[in-house]
Amino acid sequence: MSWVDIVGYAAAFAVLGSFCMTTIVPLRILAVVSNLLFGTYGVMAHLYPVFVLHSILLPINLSNGAGSLLGFIAKTASPTVWPLV
């Protein structure tokens, strides 16, 4: 098995893992990882449509992931309550 095959299988398993996610932040993180892996695979295997597709999807997933992460932080952050003296 070559390095190209290993990267391809890792990308495929990353996509499979993202379909198994039930919360959005880990899903977006795994989607970004799969975009990076598939982009690398596309270049290594000379599959340029795969590279182009995941090059387009990467900034979309980064943008949506950042928005989801900021929303998650805003939702879970509780305001600090100072005791009255």
Image (tube, rainbow, N blue to C red):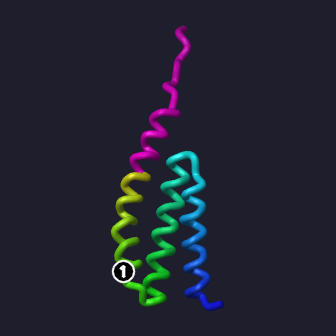
Q: Residue furthest right?
A: 1
77 w.r.t. 34: above or below: above
Q: Is residue 10 magenta?
A: no
69 w.r.t. 41: above or below: above
Q: Residue at x 57, y 80 (%)?
A: 7
Left or right side of 28 for 54: left
Which residues, given as a range, are shown in magenta?
66-85
39 w.r.t. 64: above or below: below
- Residue 55: x and y in percent read 37, 72
Q: Quadrant of residue 52?
A: bottom left
Q: Residue at x 48, y 55 (%)?
A: 28
Q: According to the image, label 1 marks what residue?
A: 49
Residue 74 vs residue 80, the one in the foreground: 74
- Residue 76: x and y in percent read 52, 33
- Residue 8: x and y in percent read 55, 79
Kindly state the secondary structure of the residue where label 1 is placed: helix
Left or right side of 32 for 53: left
> Quadrant location of the C terminus?
top right
64 w.r.t. 33: above or below: above
> Quadrant location of the N terminus?
bottom right
Residue 82 vs residue 59, the one in the foreground: 59
Q: Residue at x 41, y 78 (%)?
A: 50
Amino acid type for the residue under numbered disc 1? Pro
